[in-house]
Amino acid sequence: MARISLILPVAPGGLPTEERVLPFRRVLEESGHEIEEIVATDSRGATDFGWSDGEVKAQVADRPGLAAATVAGLCAARGEILGVLDLERG
């Protein structure tokens, strides 16, 4: 199956929790996909999210804003399929 890069853009002060992301990851893994998770923030955000999964990457954009963070995450992705999951939009 495909390797999927799941990019999670985060605003400064935001914190994507494992509990919110886990259902999405679980569905993709149960479908046979390998998942790469990238938490993307801008230069004003934190890069240590305290997840127990050591495979989650943090990517920091060099410009402010969620759009810049998302683009930085997309550029860092190594998957065959790239997906952006905005947890603030439900």
Image (cartoon, helix red, strand yellow):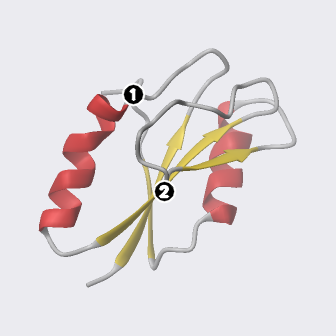
Label disc, if present, on residue 26 of the rendered structure:
none
What kind of element bears circle 2?
Answer: loop
Residue under pointer 1: 17
Q: Is residue 70 above or below residue 81?
A: above
x and y, in percent, of residue 15 in the image:
51, 22
Residue at image x 42%, y 24%? 88
Residue under pointer 2: 55
What kind of element bears circle 1?
Answer: loop
Nearest the eye: 15 or 50: 50
Residue 90 position by quadrant: top left
The mark that comes first in sequence, 2 or 1, is: 1
Residue ranking furthest to the right: 62
Label 2 Cα neighbours within 10 Å, binned few <14 / some 14-19 / many ≥20: few
Residue at image x 38%, y 26%? 89
Q: Is residue 3 above or below residue 6?
A: below
Residue 87 position by quadrant: top left
Label 2 and label 1: CA atoms lie apart by 14 Å
Nearest the eye: 37 or 61: 37
Badge 2 amino acid: Glu
Residue 29 position by quadrant: bottom left
Nearest the eye: 69 or 36: 36
**Quarter in which the N terminus is drawn:** bottom left
Badge 1 amino acid: Thr
x and y, in percent, of residue 24 in the image:
24, 47
Residue at image x 68%, y 52%? 71
Drawn side of residue 89 relative to residue 62, left or right? left
Residue ranking furthest to the top: 13
